Amino acid sequence: MLSLIPKALTLSLSSRTTTRLILIPLPLKPVASRPMSTQRMFQLKLDPLTGNSEWVVIEENEDVPESSQEPLLATTSYLDMLNDSYRNRAYRLAIDKMITKSCHVLDIGAGTGLLSMMAARAMGSSDSTTSLNTKGMVTACESYLPMVKLMKKVLHVNGMGRNIKVINKRSDELEVGVDIDSRADILVSEILDSELLGEGLIPTLQHAHDRLLVENPLTVPYRATTYGQLVESTFLWKLHDLYNNEAKALDGIHLVPPGMDSILHVKSQQYAMHCDAITKEIKLLSEPFKIFEFDFWKRPDSHGETELQIKSTDDGRVHAVVSWWVLQLDREGTIFYSTAPRWISLPIHKSTGNWCDHWKQCVWFIPGKGMSICKGEELLFHALHTETSVSYELKSQIPITDERQHNLNGKDFQLALPPERIAIYGDGEWRLSMVMAMRNALQGRVQPLCVVADDSVFLTICVARLSKTAHVLSLLPGLGDKGAQYLRTVADPNCFSIDRVEILQKGKKCLTMDDTQQKKVDLLIGEPYYFGNDGMLPWQNLRFWKERSKLDPVLSKEVIIMPFKGILKACAIFCPDIWNSRRSLSKIEGFDHAVVNTSLGACGDLPAPKEGPCLPFFTWQCGEIKKLSNVFTVMEFDFSKPISPCQGKVQVEFTEPGLCHGFALWVDWVLDSENSIVISTGPDKRYWKQGVKLMAKPVAVGFKEFGRTDLCSSTLVEASFDPSNGELNVQHTFS
């Protein structure tokens, strides 16, 4: 193993998702407005069952609206970040070391004010000693109004309200002489995502150095360095190479026809992933190599590039570049934090109890089948960064004669889908199930009218190809014109006339008999898949049921609906890593944060009847996890009837002893009325996210044969689904 940390290391730390503001089902799109002396923010609220959105106004002097059963901030990654003890300690050590006298400290992206309070304490400030002055002061800049409200509560509880000036603006809106009296001597910040640059690190630092900081300021962090490693992984290959994977399906459907290799692809970007979860499926093909270095203490360049000669360490096929970063927090190089995978030799990875979801490794896919290499061969690695992203290119110095060439920068039309959707479309088992169900549904039908209710280009092509007389009306609510253009492009290679495929007019809210030429719908189908909803909870794909209900007036009496029903499945799980990352907060490096627990949806010491929210996770990436019960059915959703409230109750016996931290929940889609074709999206299906319902406190469980009276042997699980807002309420009683 190769250590990438200098010998002077005294502290090493952990791993986070791409952005800290991920609101589900309330995607964050704040727009700031500042009339007169008050402040206002508009929060975009999304209805997951309709796809409709509305603006919610948040005023400075009002509490954050919590119209749903979950607090507004409960589905962000703030809580996970604050539970990262390695991160917190590293920043505290660096700030204590850096700040030794009164000065002006600027905290950009202050969040709950943790770093600001560390800085104020390092200067010996408290409400009882000194008030704000320009020689010894901290300015906390935070643009997100709900977090500003929370920060002020935290500062008040910790007696720091008078010594930290809170400004609700973007840092590039700050002006010396207007918002702050003088340029800052020290910058503390944590505006990093898994890729490092995605939260606007470079433009933020540029503006700060130009307008807000003294010349040659001190900064925490001091420097960030990105590293990479070439890997072979069939799993990673399947996440992006649809052309070669669907070739093995032999069903005649060509989502990526020959000669159109990039028409349906993943975006050329880095994807955040817990690569430790696939360690056994990865073959390392190079030593780790340094890519870029970013110094916080000086103004960064907007663009940069580098070329490296990488020597392969083994024979294989390069499918991806796995990358991570190392943060040097102090100038002397004694305090570090790393997001490296565990196969890299770092002291932090001797601790197994600090799994975090707010920072992960990143994966960059090598196009097509990847690049075949031999041990000792040298490859040319080219890296480029913009203000907000990093991209790579890998070239062999041996002429390529038997590899397909891939051009993802061509002028031809391209449709980009998420990696997991690409992998699903390339999965032979999934395709076989869909084609079989469609073939059965179309059997004996002449000139059927088929409506594809979701964004499934696969099902649109499948129906048009299987039935030469079918008329297909595809709604494509998310893909829209791009989806329509894609279908027109691939029609000929898939042997169907585009004249038989119609896309619902953009902006039309509901299908009417005028749209169907007064003909009733014979088949209503969906995967279901809604473009842009990849971060949603599994049952929020019940939007298909909502659409089916809206279409009820145009459905024939003999209509076939696919899927026929959904089954909410669950199992009890031992998941200490997820639970610890979402546990309630008390003191963080000496600062009381208990006041934020309810707002951030923490599990633990919450006031009754408050509970933590259900959150979407790829559970297979969630560190240590184990099933404690058999899979059980909670309730069923019957799509043959209009949408309605649903309830379910089941007594669950535990099959394994251990601590129960919560439940994993997902939907199995039954495609036909005979219940013979089922698409499962459970934990063993790695292309789908499951919902995780965490308990307030873990419960020791076991089965009766153990004979222990202190173990709960079963639990009663009750759930209800509310079609008015798409929320699923899950309750449990242990016995």
Image (tube, helix red, strand yellow):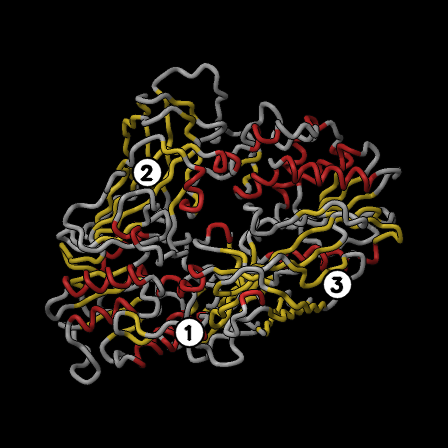
Q: What kind of residue is marked 2?
A: Gly
Q: Who comes first in sequence, dot 1 or dot 3?
A: 1
Please determine whether, in this image, residue 153 is positioned above or below residue 481: below
Q: Who comes first in sequence, dot 2 or dot 3?
A: 2
Marks 2, 3: nearer the viewer: 2
In this view of the protein, which residue sits in the foreground, 92 or 191?
A: 92
Residue closest to the far left: 101
Q: CA distance from mark 1 to mark 2?
A: 37 Å
Please determine whether, in this image, residue 47 is positioned above or below residue 295: below
In this view of the protein, which residue sits in the foreground, 105 or 233?
A: 233
Residue bearing the label numbered 2? 228
Estimate the x, y position of residue 135 in percent, counting from the top left: 13, 72
Please determine whether, in this image, residue 594 is positioned above or below residue 470: below
Q: Quadrant of the N terminus?
A: top left
Q: CA distance from mark 1 to mark 3?
A: 35 Å
Left or right, 506 with reference to 673:
left
* Residue pictured at 75% horizontal, 66% vertical: 644
Estimate the x, y position of residue 298 in percent, counting from the top left: 19, 50
Residue bearing the label numbered 3? 643
Estimate the x, y position of residue 234 in percent, counting from the top left: 49, 34
Determine whether label 2 and label 3 are within 8 Å by CB: no
* Residue pictured at 57% horizontal, 69% vertical: 713
Residue bearing the label numbered 1? 597
Q: Is residue 51 visible?
A: no
